[in-house]
Image (cartoon, helix red, strand yellow):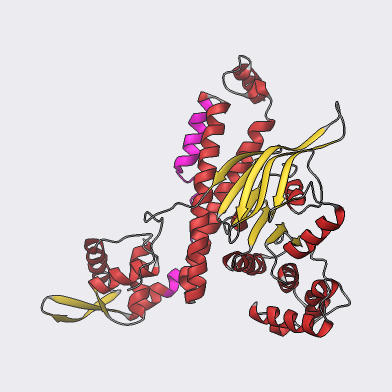
Amino acid sequence: MSIRYSLLAILDAGPRHGYALKSEFEAATGNVWPLNVGQVYSTLSRLERDGLVLVAEEDDGQKTYRISDTGRQELRRWFGTPVVREVVPRQELAIKLVFAMRAGPEQVRDVVQRQLVATMASLQEFTKLKATAERDGDLAWLMMLDALIFQAEAEARWLELCEARLARVRPELLPGHEDADATRDVERTP
Amino acid sequence: MRVLSIERVGRRYGAPPRQVVALDDVSLTVEAGEMLAVMGPSGSGKSTLLQLAGGLTRPTSGRVVLCGSELGTVGEAGLSLVLRRRVGFVFQDINLLAALTAAENVSLPLELDGMRPRSAMATARALLSSLGLDDVANRLPAQMSGGQQQRVAVARAVIGGRSLLLADEPTGALDSLSGESVMQLLRAQSDDGCAVVLVTHDVRHAAWADRLLCLRDGRLIDEVRPPAGPESLLRKDRV
């Protein structure tokens, strides 16, 4: 969905042909979302069908697109609407922890530790990139890196909390303990 | 060049059976130009490690070597000389002297070390200027933001060219952007050749370091280095 609006936003600055849109999109998002040129053209034809972009000119079979007034209105509406958060993101790490729990607390501790090291390493790399972005005065890229940094921070803090909870939990509540299932059943009884 | 070497250090408080083990068999080294972050929950031994590194407390076992001097073997006078010349501290509580301007706060360590006041002040102003803090040089701490105060405190900690900068939760009381400006300053000190040890529980700020060590219950449990080589997570190739 955001590809559609990103292309509109790029066209809002002036007419472009398909390949230029692909390159600008990738540069603006630091190649986090590589875009194939087929995706660009299929999105453009849907935007054209919906009257949001117009073909400005056609030269040797290469079309140049421009944004229409309706397209501009649609772009303003997008900027003015908050993004809806997925309530239950299908996050591989969360799923991994849930199933590691069945194998026992040692397995969870291992998953948490390895992930924490990997997440911190990513955080270090984003931070290095940020120092470069700061020097270049690239504000859009800087804010994008901030987003990645805060997401990684949230994950690291969550993992630390998981670790702390594991250290504190009563052994009889852990899987593998003979009373575990019985205890949980009792606790769930209203 | 190795600035700090902590070798199999332990620190215990009290006597058995009520003994508290703050640090247990911890070893690490820090080179000139390297920034090390030590992370861990409250009570994991982070601050004790920093106090040992800065000679503020002595280990109950193992040894601490700072710029070639083993801190346990130099006398009190020698120790205070090594610390004054070689080590700078930055704490969460900024503790600049309230009655002195930024420039006076920064020049004070040089004056205490015997430099003439005019030279000390000129050196302090030059340092503040190189750190982008010209506009606060004549302000009292109360006239500066928290971020500016902490950056001045970093300047005070490194004036005179210290080999080791020890920072204990230096961003703890600051908002995100001010915290970041302090981290940039610490990073710049390290890039200029100072060894920096940062103690923090903030993963975002720890990520500014070259290496991260994790402490749990007084023991080092993990070390993180950034991924090396060309397989970077992101590439920013501008068109």
Q: Residue at point 67% right, 42% down? A: B7
State the image quarter where residue A158 is shown: top right
Q: Which residue appears farthest toward the top when viewing the image?
A: A178
Above-or-below relation of A92 to B195: above
Q: Residue at point 83% right, 66% down? A: B95
> In the image, which residues are magenta?
A76-102
| Residue A68 in the image, given as x and y percentages of width and height | 31, 79
Report the side of A113 relative to B73 (left or right): left
| Residue A25 in the image, given as x and y percentages of width and height | 34, 69
Q: Is residue A80 visible?
A: no
Report the side of B131 relative to A85 (left or right): right
Above-or-below relation of B79 to A170: below
Task: Please name whichever residue, B108 or A153, is drawn nearer the observer in this view of the structure.
Answer: B108
State the image quarter where residue B102 is shown: bottom right
Queried whether the magenta region covers residue A92, the answer comes back as yes
Queried whether the magenta region covers residue B148, the answer comes back as no
Task: Please name whichever residue, B90 or A104, is drawn nearer the observer in this view of the structure.
Answer: B90
Count of numbered circles on the image: 0
Above-or-below relation of B192 to A119: below
Screen quadrant of the N terminus of chain B = bottom right
Q: Which residue appears farthest toward the right when viewing the image?
A: B99
| Residue A113 in the image, given as x and y percentages of width and height | 55, 38
Q: Which residue appears farthest toward the left when viewing the image?
A: A60
Q: Residue at point 68% right, 60% down? A: B164
Screen quadrant of the C terminus of chain B = bottom left
Report the side of B18 relative to B82 (left or right): right
Q: Residue at point 70% right, 66% down? A: B162
